[in-house]
Image: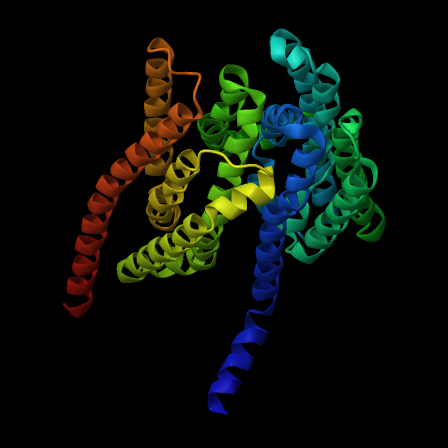
Amino acid sequence: MNSFGKINRYYKTHNLLIENFSYLAFLQIFLLAYPLITYPYLVDVLGKELYGVILSAQMLASYASLFIDFGSNFVCAKHVSINREDKNKLSEILSNVLAIRLVLFVVFLVIYVLIAFWVPIYREYMWIFVLTYGFCTNDLLFPQFFFQGLERMKLISIINVATKIVMVMLIFLFVKTKEDCLLVPIIYSIGYFVGGIISLYEIVYKMNIKLIKPSLNSAMIYLKDSSSIFATDLVCTIKDKLSYLLVGTFVGMSDVVIYDLGLKLHGIAAKPYMLICTVMFPRLAKNKNIRQLKLIMLISFFLTLAIIVVANVFLEKIVIFFLHEECDLFPLRLFLVGPLVLSVSYVISNNLFVAFGYNKYMFISILVTTFVYVLCLITVFITGHMNTVMSFISIALISYSAELVYRLLMAKKIISKEKSKKIHEDVITYS
């Protein structure tokens, strides 16, 4: 009874935190799972070649999305949280962030179209690429930073899940043949646009936050404040997503589908340790407990290992279910080694470097990985091995391994420093 009372008190004390995390976890799992619902259907209806084109267009649009967001979802959430009681300040934040996004949306529309026109294989499917840019309306209109700052993750989850369920239903209803390929980006673009409009309606009419004329000085402050996060995101995206586009250009559009399936399996295996790190981050940031950090690292590693073993056992059936045909499983099996390496690397980065206040090491580690990635890419290009999926998977694994080695070396240094600091503090306390 006493234990139940403690649990009840804990829940009441941390009710909002638990609720927000629950909605965030549910949303992340849903966002990971929902593309898999239409995956086998679209491969079957459109064929691997055409679906590979659509996936390449989506990946190119994701680069534009990164610039349109400019790191605001993380940094501006902090400004909203600090000024949550000041509606005038909230109006200023919202209006300026949306204004910056609008300018960037127009600028990168031009750049996006020029790239699609410049690459011959993209130019052949120009309308698919142009319509896919509509995905970016999500980053233009959906103010995730605002809801996050106000700790209203429930509303984000409801809007996201509802719009995506409708989009999935429309895909199954209207996409019946290869001739319907343009409907795929149209349906998704309209869905993202509607989701953004609904979210703004909630803010403007339900929360009474007005949209005001943006100020250039204020806009520059938010842009500058978000620049460090944006730089980190940009480096990570170049490293993680460039191979996606290169596979389509040098190997073939049908191979993009195989590479994409590998990435999705990679994402599923990675999600548990990412959620563990998210949950434990505040506690580690507060108590800086090295023993707790090591325990998280072990749990993340062995949980990821278990998921990878299960995935490998059923991999043949998974491939047939999603691709409707057999393929060489070795590249996918090799791809699944990635999450195992990252399960340790990610914990060190987020729950040691950031939580303990050594942010510079996280950014340096990303630069090290990017340098290794580019070096491998140049080597593969010079040696004429750009025409196989295996080359790009090998590059990814070498990059992840280089990142892990650097982070382990820095982790050893930081842990030694933290232990010395702890001993020194204990000596002062007892003396």
Residue 213 seen in this snapshot: no
Total of numbered circles in the picture? 0
In front of the other: 206 or 254 = 254
Vertical comparison of 331 with 419: above or below: above
Does 396 sit left or right of 33 as displayed?
Answer: left
In screen coordinates, is 4 left or right of 192?
left
Which residue is rendered at x = 58% and y = 75% of the image?
12
When the figure is inspected, residue 221 is found, relative to residue 13, above or below; the finding is: above
Q: 135 above or below 163?
A: above
Which residue is depicted at the point 44% across and 27% down?
Answer: 239
Of 372 and 156, nearer the camera is 372
Horizontal arrangement in the rendering, residue 245 relative to residue 375 (left or right)? right
Res. 171 image quadrant: top right
To which quarter of the image does residue 353 belong? top left
Q: Position of residue 214 (x, y in %)?
A: 74, 29
Residue 340: x percent and y percent?
36, 46
Query: Is residue 257 visible to us here?
Result: yes
